[in-house]
Amino acid sequence: MRIAPIIENSPFARIARVVLKSRSVAMVLGGTIHLSGATKEEFMRDPRWVAHEMCHIRQYQQYGRVGFLRRYLRDWLRYGYYNIPFEAEARLAGDQEAHLYANGRPVPSRAHSHKGAGEA
Ligand SMILES: [Zn+2]
């Protein structure tokens, strides 16, 4: 499976990390996956996490740069982070599509995946 471009040590992902109080964060901006607190290798080793972010890439492609961000932020304020529809869809993708990014290896359980990938 082809993966979107990845930027490590992203200042934008660092801000999200602080806001979400998370050890590591991946976020999609402009069709690119931004990482903070995790290397590209660590990210790529977690197929559930990759599937989650690739779902956000599709949402971004569907709604466009402004449309995606506007909906995301509006729904965050309206429903809270966990219940953002884009996040619910990406969590489902993390479960259902992880095998596409596992390179033939078994998909680790949610407990052994990044916290944001399949759960909260
Ligand atoms: Zn997400």
Image (spheres, helix red, strand yellow):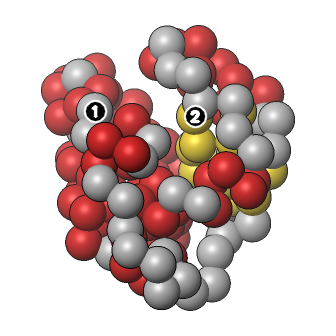
Viewed as shown, does residue 107 lie left or right of 5? left
Distance between the alpha carbons at the discs numbered 1 and 2: 12 Å
| Residue drawn where x is 57% and y is 43% of the image | 27
Pick the front one: 109 or 23:
109
x and y, in percent, of residue 115 in the image: 39, 36
**Residue at the spot 59% in from the left edge and 30% down from the top edge:** 24
Among the 4 quarters of the image, the one containing residue 10:
top right
Q: Position of residue 80 (x, y in %)?
A: 23, 23
Q: Is mark 1 within 8 Å of ligand 1?
A: no
Q: Is residue 76 above or below residue 112?
A: above
Return the mark for residue 120.
Answer: 1
Q: Which residue type does callout 1 highlight?
A: Ala
Residue 28 in view in this figure? yes
Per the rendering, the mark at residue 25 is 2
Pick the residue in front: 78 or 5: 5
Residue 92 vertical placement versus 26 (above, below): below
